[in-house]
Amino acid sequence: MKKHIKTAVYIILFLMAAVSVLQGAKNALHFSQDFQYDAALALRCGINPYEESLEPTGALENSPVGEFYRVFREAGAPQKMEANQFPSLLMLLFPLTFLPYKAARTAWLILNLLFSVGICVLLRKTFLKEMDRDVFNMLMLLTAAGMPFRNQLGVGQHTLFAFFFFLLSMYLSERGNGIISGLSLSVSYFKYTLTAPLALYFLYKRKYTEFLVSLIPHVLLTFVGAVMLKKSYIDMIRQPLQVSSLLSGEGSIDIGALSGGTSAGLLFTALIMAGCLAMAFILPAKEDNRFFALLILFSLIMTYHRIYDFFVLSAVSCGTLLSGLTFKGTDGKKPDRPEIIIGVLYLVLLIYFYFVIRIFNESRFALYTAAGLYYVFLVLYISFFRKQGQRQ
């Protein structure tokens, strides 16, 4: 790419990213409705957030959680509790619940901005370390400019938080810090709909210590939650899942959304997870990037996800042409035709999810088109994945 063209692209992407981040930050300071501050505060106060989500008793209004709902009513956007996180995960937010809600959402915004920078740094040090520097920089600016990242920031979601700690866990693991890596992986489960499938990557890499350590805090803290709420251990697992099941058909293009949250969709999801688990043990060692990319692609459709979670599509580049230096193939050689097709479709997918879908305000037609593009890409990627494996 000629220098003046590259400079122009950088300037355009930087301006787009700056506007996007500023708008996302502005929205976060006014809303951050998905923060789950209310559920975490209720748990800290000994109020069962799951029962209040399923069958509200009115106890929240006369508790410290009442401020949260008053803020949103005054803003003309009343909220209701949807505590779909396990108690061990809500406890991660306890430090922020000691702040008034308006201060807490500001602190959460600052943390999410820091997590965003951390994601860029850690992707560069792990899965995208071989990518051309300019391509990497432009990809990160494109991500920040896109609607998914902007909305992720604005609604105060937890995917930035979870994805950062997953990548941190991977980075620490590669440097031999197994215990600390496992604890970081444990924290990343806050968005378990994304990171639980990604955790299979540790099994693929035979990082059993990290994987087992990641489970221990949740086993212990679930017991603490049961004591706090005077409920059984089983209730602390069952009740969050009950709340989550109410959202199973409300995603964007995931299997639950497309199947209407039916049991058939859940069965299909279980089969995909089982297939990913099997691949983690039988795939050859040289499939690192392509398998990680495949786990991301599957994780976004197996369970409830809205478009704001799809900013992680940028990390799928590690399994496409973009992962190679100066657009070489993923094996460093001249790319073949299927790999070129996958690369082109991947770029189309990014542009559609990051920008085009916003033009149509995520209408039903826009989501059906997104689903069509995504599933076609996934099928072709799996086909490409298999052919590459047979080649090796």
Image (tube, grey):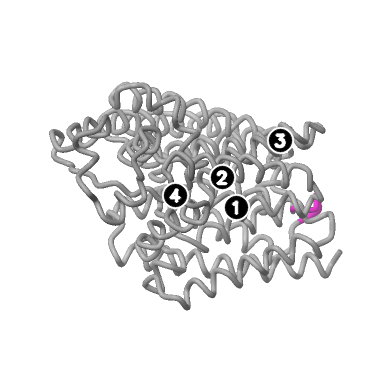
Helix, strand or loop for disc 1: helix
Residue depicted at 80% across the width and 66% down the height:
389
Q: Amino acid at mark 2?
A: Tyr
Task: First in sequence, mark 2 or 4: give its number.
Answer: 2
User: Disc 1 marks which residue?
Assistant: 196
The circle drawn on residue 189 is 2
**Mark 1 residue crowding within 10 angstroms, few (<14) / some (14–19) / many (20+):** some
N-term mark: 3 or 4: 3
How much space separates mark 1 and mark 2, taking CA atoms? 6 Å
The local crowd at label 2, few if under 14, some if 14 to 19, many if 20 or more residues have their Cα within 10 Å, is many
Front disc: 3 or 4:
4
Which tag, 1 or 2, sits closer to the chain's start? 2
Query: As displayed, is residue 2 above or below residue 385?
Result: above
Mark 3: amino acid = Ser
Marks 2, 4: nearer the viewer: 4
Residue in the foreground of this view, choosing between 52 and 25:
52
Residue type at tag 1: Ala
